[in-house]
């Protein structure tokens, strides 16, 4: 592999990484919100052990930061996104 090929491969890997973090973010927020909605006693689900969620919710993508491809920023708070999504699910829930 030449230097130019290695630099190009890094760019491709970095773009793939950034896209994967965003996909994880979207899936994480959605899954955590659905879990929380199902654990809410007001929708008719008993919150049985089949519905468990993440032990700790991350504040944002800080743990996945990369200085070039996924820089740490002030970012959106995942916790508040989860709460908003959960509330949206519960508001639109039909029994």
Image (cartoon, grey):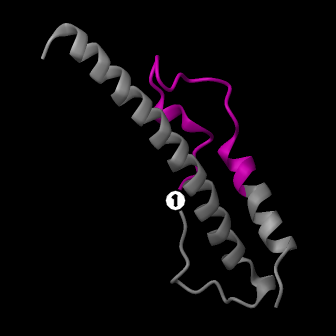
Residue drawn at 65 percent across, 69 percent down: 34
Q: Position of residue 60 (x, y in %)?
A: 60, 38
Instruction: Please give the count of numbered marks on the rendered protein.
Output: 1
Magenta region, mostly helix, strand or loop? loop
Residue identified by numbered label 1: 55
Residue drawn at 70 percent across, 40 percent down: 77
Q: Is residue 27 left or right of residue 37?
A: left
Q: Is residue 68 above or below residue 21?
A: above
Magenta span of residues:
55-82
Q: Secondary structure at mark 1?
A: loop
Q: Position of residue 26 (x, y in %)?
A: 60, 51
Residue 76 is inside the magenta segment: yes
Which residue is outermost to the left?
1
Quarter residue 66 falls in: top left
Q: Position of residue 1 (x, y in %)?
A: 12, 17
User: Is the residue marked by circle 1 packed among few (<14), some (14-19), or many (20+) residues within 10 Å?
Assistant: few
Q: Is residue 81 above or below residue 86?
A: above
Q: Quadrant of the C terminus?
A: bottom right
Q: Is residue 91 left or right of residue 21?
A: right
Viewer-side residue, 95 vs 9: 9
Residue 70 is inside the magenta segment: yes
């Amino acid at each position: 592999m030449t230097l130019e090929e290695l630099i190009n491969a890094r760019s491709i890997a970095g773009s793939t990484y950034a896209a994967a973090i965003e996909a994880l973010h979207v899936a994480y927020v959605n899954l955590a919100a659905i879990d929380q909605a199902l654990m809410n006693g007001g929708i008719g689900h008993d919150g049985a052990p089949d519905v468990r969620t993440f032990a700790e919710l991350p504040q944002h993508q800080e743990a996945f930061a990369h200085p070039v491809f996924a820089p740490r920023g002030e970012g959106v708070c995942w916790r508040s996104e989860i709460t908003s999504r959960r509330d949206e699910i519960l508001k639109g829930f039909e029994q």
